[in-house]
């Protein structure tokens, strides 16, 4: 497991492919508000489809949700580990589409603001308000992509929510005996705030022998197994049994 950098800029680049712009001008071609423009929306999602070898649009929408969840995880990690709020306005988040429809992001460093941590109560209110703003962004993007691709909004919500809850499931472990050790109370508090608005109702899995292999299982398949790339099923997929999951993990760790 990679060590977490204590420098916010390095952390964002290494963990989430988010870079910071220094001159308020982004070299990335899109912003998320482009998804609200019909012609640009078509360009963005056609680019996604091309990188995925033109699967049915429902698969494009499903995988877009997973790709977009990366920025959402970056946003919540920055709050819990650094007390910094990344921009969540759709016109402030620049992105580019690369191989296999992955997305890399760029934001202006001047759009990053500090959480109000003057008191515990103020910090809690500030983080709760930020989570609400993040969900407003999610609502906007999911509505747009769902209407274009035909993927059900609930499926997109579920895929993103799954990644956010898995983030906090692992974040506590990753901070033990590191420079982030003192952040553990904030991680737990922020996880509780996330649960208030988006309850953790995913099934927990842990490998029977390799107990460091644990995570939540998805409620919806992301449909990546239908790609021409022979992607197969994800380890968190609800379509496979735990016995298959166990065997797959055992095989991977023995290589």
Image: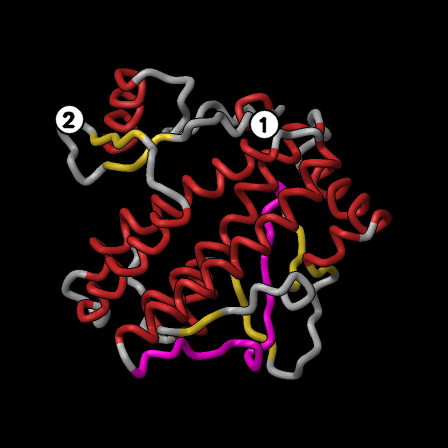
What secondary structure is found at the residue carrying circle 1? loop
Which image quadrant for residue 47? top right
Kindly tell me whether residue 255 is visible in this rendering: no
Residue 207 visible from this viewpoint: yes
Outermost residue toward the right in this view: 39
Assess whether residue 175 is covered by the magenta stretch: no
Residue 21's place in the image compared with 58, above or below, is below
Residue 217 placed where, x, y %?
A: 35, 30
Dots 1 and 2: beta carbons under 8 Å?
A: no
Query: Percent from the top left, x then y, of residue 192?
Result: 29, 53
153 relative to 97, above or below:
above
| Above or below for 232 versus 139 | above
What percent of the width, then of the height, locates residue 93?
63, 64
- Mark 2 residue crowding within 10 angstroms, few (<14) / some (14–19) / many (20+): few
- The secondary element bearing badge 2 is classed as loop
Side of 170 relative to 218 (left or right): left
Residue at left 57%, top 64%? 88
Q: Quadrant of residue 204?
A: top left
Magenta part of the protein: which range?
A: 100-118
* Residue located beneath label 2 in the image: 208
Q: Nearer the viewer, residue 223 or 253?
A: 223
Q: Give me the residue at 46% from left, 71% from top.
A: 85
Question: Where is residue 42, by image quadrant?
Answer: top right
Q: CA distance from mark 1 to mark 2?
A: 30 Å
Determine which residue is flagged by label 1.
Answer: 229
Name the mark nearer the viewer: 1 or 2.
Answer: 2
């Amino acid at each position: 497991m990679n060590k977490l950098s204590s420098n916010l800029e390095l952390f964002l680049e290494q963990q989430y492919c988010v870079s910071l712009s220094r001159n308020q001008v982004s070299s990335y071609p899109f912003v998320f508000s482009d998804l609200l423009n019909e012609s640009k929306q078509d360009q963005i999602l056609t680019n996604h489809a091309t990188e995925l070898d033109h699967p049915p649009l429902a698969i494009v929408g499903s995988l877009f949700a997973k790709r977009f969840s990366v920025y959402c995880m970056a946003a919540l990690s920055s709050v819990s580990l650094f007390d910094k709020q990344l921009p969540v306005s759709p016109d402030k988040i620049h992105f580019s589409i690369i191989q296999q429809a992955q997305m890399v992001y760029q934001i202006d460093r001047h759009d990053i603001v500090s959480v109000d941590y003057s008191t515990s109560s103020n910090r809690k209110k500030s983080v709760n308000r930020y989570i609400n703003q993040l969900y407003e962004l999610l609502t906007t993007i999911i509505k747009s992509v769902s209407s274009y691709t035909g993927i059900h909004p609930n499926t997109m919500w579920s895929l993103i929510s799954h990644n956010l809850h898995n983030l906090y499931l692992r974040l506590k472990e990753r901070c033990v005996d590191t420079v982030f050790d003192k952040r553990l109370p904030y991680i737990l508090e922020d996880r509780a705030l996330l649960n208030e608005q988006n309850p953790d109702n995913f099934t927990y899995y842990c490998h029977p022998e390799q107990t460091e292999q644990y995570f939540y299982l998805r409620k919806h398949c992301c449909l990546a197994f239908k790609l021409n790339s022979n992607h197969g099923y994800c380890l968190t997929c609800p379509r496979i049994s735990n016995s298959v999951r166990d065997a797959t993990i055992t095989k991977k760790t023995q290589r």
